[in-house]
Structures are given as C-alpha cells and as structure tokens.
Image (cartoon, rainbow, N blue to C red):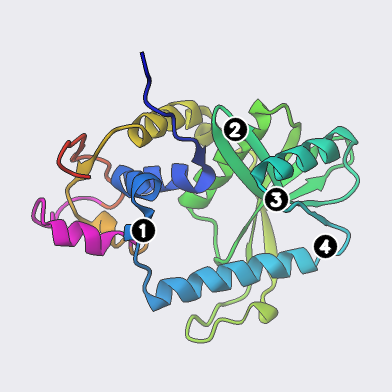
Amino acid sequence: MSTAPTHRLSKSKVAAFEHCPLRMWLQVHRPELAQHDGDTLARFQFGHDVGEKARFLQPDGVLIEAVPDIRAALAHTAELIATGPHHPLFEATFRHADVLVRVDVLEPDDQGGWRAVEVKASNRVKPTHLADLSTQIWVMRGAGVPISQAIIRHVSNRIDWRRPDATMVRFRDEDVTQRIERYVEGRPAIVAEAMATANLPALSRNMGPHCRRPFSCEFQAHCTARQEVPLIANASAGQLGNWTANPRAA
C-alpha cells in the first residue's frame, strides 16, 4: 500500500504556518503563485544586507554554504560542531524531526557550548522573532547541540525606510534565553500541526486582516482572485481560525 509523501519543513515554513496555515500550504504546494511587491522586495534586500553586515563584523567566522546541496551544509556543520567551538559559524545547518534550520550565527561560549544568534533588520524584538529563534533552538537541542544563550541581534539605530542603508546599521544584542522557553516548549505541537497541514491534499481559509498584517502576504492576489469567501473585516490579526481542508482549494 502506498503512502502520501511527507513534506519536510524549514524554519521559515513553520513561521509561515504560525502566520497563516494556508500561506504555508501554498509555499509548499504552489510557490509559483507568490507575488512580492516592490516594497517587500526592498525590505528583503535590506534584511539580507543587514545579515551581511553582521557577518562582516566577525571576520573570524566560518560561512557554511549549501554547496552542492543542503546535505553538504549538514555534513560541514556536523564536522565543525564535533571539533569543538573555535570560531563563529554562519548559516550552521541542522535537521531534527524533518525540520531544517540554518542559524544566522552560532558563537562559541567559554564553556564548550554555543550562543545562538538571530539577526533581525528591526529596531526591537518582536514575538515573531522569538518564535523564529525558538524553532532553531528546538531543532538544535534535538540534534544534540549545547546552547547556552539565545540572542536577538537587532538594529540599534533608527532606520530610514525611504532610503535604508545597511552600511550605517549598528547592532544591539538582546538576551532572550528565558523569554523563548515557553515558545520552545510549544514547538513540538506547532511543528506536528504544521506537518499535518503541509501533507493535506488541499486547504482553504477565509481572508482577513492577517493577509496584510504584520506584513503583506505574498499570496493575497491568488486568494483574492479565488473569492472563496468575503473579506472578514473583524477577524483578529494572527487568528488561525476559519481554515479547513478543502478538496476544491488547490
């Protein structure tokens, strides 16, 4: 008897699930439907540039590249972790329970462990940042990596979003080790639900404010065009309700 394929998840897809299950489902099954506006693309680029700036400030760091594929990144990471902490690692790659993460920065501590750092192009720590980092901590713990601290490295100076310039960015580290524990504890249930959702044959969800907040979803045009249901003006942002398996939704 054949079984349905299991879709592996990444940190970004788990985050998409927490934002909107349908968004994650579309990322898995219909990524070609995504449409990013110019403002979103500019913010993506700025975020990439901020990450590059963070690496530049640690010249002794080792970048782990997924060349020729992600298996090479997993193997290289395992090799460097096994030899013991010596240098910061950029994009260290781990897999646990079919969830793949690439960590912005792993910094060696002075006790043989590591500090996990998530770099964010934001002036403050947001709940979504804590959720993102908690997914990484959960995966790394599952992979047997000793993590002593969890840190959000965010921008400390004001960002002019009309002309964002990563070269002018300064960073501030915020230790969120204790704050993310409740997020980490909830990861197994979140991941299990996300995995089950990814493996559904189809999915639908009512549109609402979550389509635009905390950012504009890349599948808005697709969902609007389908006109499955009217826009729900009074749905709370981040609400996960009103989504169902739908054999006609694909």
Q: Which mark is residue 21?
A: none
Q: Is residue 222 magenta?
A: yes
> Mark 3 or mark 4: which comes first in sequence?
4
Task: Tell me where residue 62 appears, x and y as whole percent.
Answer: 83, 54
Mark 2–mark 4 distance (CA, rounded to whole Å) = 25 Å
Circle 2: is it few (<14), some (14-19), or many (20+) Cα within 10 Å?
many
* Dot 2 amino acid type: Trp
Q: Callout 2: helix, strand or loop? A: helix
Q: Label 1 amino acid?
A: Glu
Q: Classify 10 Å Cα crowding around label 4: few (below 14), some (14-19), many (20 and above).
A: some
Disc 4 residue type (three-letter): Gln
Q: Secondary structure at mark 4?
A: loop
- The answer to whether residue 211 of the structure is visible from this angle is yes
Question: Where is mark 4, residue-wise?
Answer: 58
Q: Earlier in the sequence, mark 2 or mark 1?
A: 1
Residue drawn at the location 47% of the way across and 29% of the way down: 186
Say the numbered circle drawn on residue 32: 1
In magenta, the rendered stretch is 217-236
